[in-house]
Amino acid sequence: MKRPTKAIKATLKSRFLDRYSDAVSELHYRSLYELIVAVMLSAQCTDKRVNIITPALFNAFPSVEDLAQASLEKVTSLINTCSFFNNKAKNLILMAQSVMENYGGQIPLDEKSLMKLAGVGQKTAHVVLIEYTKANVMAVDTHVFRVAHRLGLSQAKTPAKTEQDLVNAFKTELHTLHQAFVLFGRYICTAKNPKCESECFVREFCQTTQTFKPT
DNA sequence: CTCCCGATAT
DNA sequence: ATATCAGGAG
């Protein structure tokens, strides 16, 4: 597997930025509170499904205060069509309670604090920062991980290492590149049956073309 | 490394 | 009917 040269990394970067200059998250939210809840729910679950669930959830619990006082049963019943709903319901309430008790009701906007919240790991924390503050950080979800590996940008086994590889490769405009990689991975460089021939605009840089080339 | 766990694509 | 999708905690 060839590592991309500096020149190729630059080309990849501009291709993705050109293609996805106006890329935004597909999660529906109207506040930082709604954002963090939506991102927490999106763990191992599609954004599409999260968007089906959240309107009723936000209606029942319009603010962190409301969620902090919510009953587990009520939250569970509102999110039980998304994966790991028992864990998520528990974590959502714990997260809200922690925000009330430790951060005066203000959801913190730094990585360390975010990651102390129940159910918030590095990926969730980074996505919140990217979305809400356009922080120059990378978040590696399953799409970003797959795309980075197919393009030879990382050989790392863990998302954290892959994140570092991507930061080193691109350095700036990471928040836009994150969105770009997610959308590219979701619709073009899909896990199964990627649209290599028909839609991939970085085909010539793919390290795994053989695997996916139609026979 | 294992558990958590519904939805959707095939 | 079964495989595959999609992160965090212990």
Image: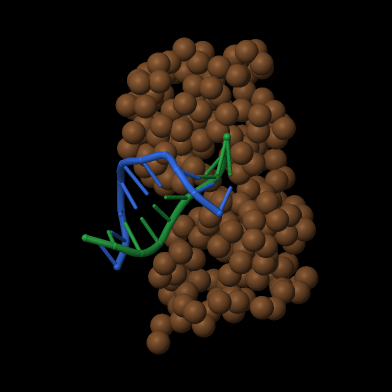
Chain colours: A brown, B blue, C green
Left or right? Give the position of C2 relative to A124. Answer: left
- Residue A199 coordinates in the image, percent (x, y): 46, 71
- Establish if A50 lies above or below A102: below
- Residue sitting at x 60%, y 19%: A98
- Establish if A32 lies above or below A102: below
The one nearer the camera, A2 or A119, is A119
- The quarter holding residue A4 reads bottom right
- Residue sitting at x 62%, y 63%: A148
- Residue sitting at x 46%, y 36%: A41
Evaluate whether residue A31 shows in this view. Answer: no
Task: Pick the quarter of the image with the C terminus of chain A.
Answer: bottom left
- Residue sitting at x 51%, y 37%: A39
Residue positioned most to the bottom: A215
Task: Pick the quarter of the image with the N terminus of chain A.
Answer: bottom right
Left or right? Give the position of C5 relative to A116. Answer: left
- Residue A59 coordinates in the image, percent (x, y): 37, 21
Q: How many marks?
A: 0
Left or right? Give the position of B7 relative to A205. Answer: left
- The quarter holding residue A100 reads top right
Left or right? Give the position of A135 relative to A31. Answer: right
Evaluate whether residue A75 shows in this view. Answer: yes
The one nearer the camera, A112 or A105, is A112
- Residue B1 coordinates in the image, percent (x, y): 55, 54
The one nearer the camera, A17 or C1, is C1
The one nearer the camera, A76 or A186, is A76
